[in-house]
Amino acid sequence: MMRAIEPMSLPDLAPAAVPEWRPEFRWVDPRILLVDDAYQRGLSSRSVSLIRRVVGQWSFAAFKPPVVVDVEGSLHVVDGQHTAIAAASHPEIVTIPVMVIEAAAANARADAFVRHNRDRIAVTPMHLHHAMVLAGDEDAQTIAQVCERAGATILRHPPNGRYRVGDTMAVGSIRSLVERRHAMGARRVLQLCVEAGLAPIAAGHIKAVERLLFAKEYAGTISEATIKAALGDLSRIERDAARFAAEHRVPIWRGLASVIFQGRGRRNG
């Protein structure tokens, strides 16, 4: 389904004045670009991982031109330093397009940096998952197949009303589950959550059920029927799990697994 870009009616908003200047696009050598450390962050381990991924998977179809300011002939990067560094690090990239804006003063450039990083809607992991499925990513398609066969649904966004049984936004946890337990094991965990009537299936539920089914101290000693029955009384079980987690200083999902295994939720009724 295609959706046209249409203007919105904003009667309570006074539009800002539009300056006469317009951004200019230039093709430049990324190695001539400069980054002002006064307001931009340095490179972290995540930055290095991102740059490595961009270099290794370079595609102009996924390229966003860095935003720069011409300061007395020098081009200062306002947004997109990771892209610029990746381009400079790629042996076959000689020039890249950049968008040149006006921001003569240092505080104006810092303000532009803030607005580029603040005034945006982040892509959620759920939206990214669905896009990756459509793009043909094998891992994302495996996750989609596992969920479909287990009766679980990865939502694109939180529902306006109530969650339905099997709904989940825990795409990161499901991805990790598939990596650890492969498709069959992941399907077993998710299907048990669905059959228990969980709405939604949260990350903690997935981790607790996985622990009960596969951890050495639990595997084979508790039936799926017992787990399912306990999860069916989740509101009371979760209170016990929170208490157990606080007492033993462990994550709540581990408390949930322990409470289900010990049958404390049933005995404390």
Image (tube, rainbow, N blue to C red):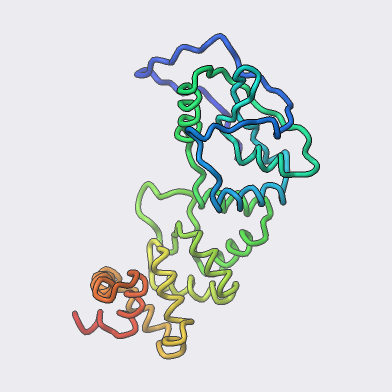
Outermost residue, top side: 20
Please give left or right for residue 180 compared with residue 108 in the image. Answer: right
Residue occupying image coordinates x 45% and y 34%: 118
For the point 42% across and 75% down, which residue is it?
209
Location of the N terminus (image quadrant) = top right
Q: Position of residue 173 (x, y in %)?
A: 48, 64
Q: Quadrant of residue 252?
A: bottom left
Residue at image point 63% right, 25% down: 75
Task: Tell me which corner region of the image, top left, top right, bottom left or bottom right, holds residue 202.
Answer: bottom left
Q: Where residue 113 appears, x then y in whole percent?
A: 50, 30
- Drawn side of residue 149 relative to residue 256, left or right: right
Extreme-bottom residue of the structure:
221
**Rendered view: 76 above or below 125:** above
Image coords of residue 62 (percent x, y): 67, 41
Q: Is the residue 218 above or below the residue 60 in the image?
A: below
The answer to whether 18 is drawn above or below residue 179 in the figure is above
Q: Is residue 171 left or right of residue 92?
A: left
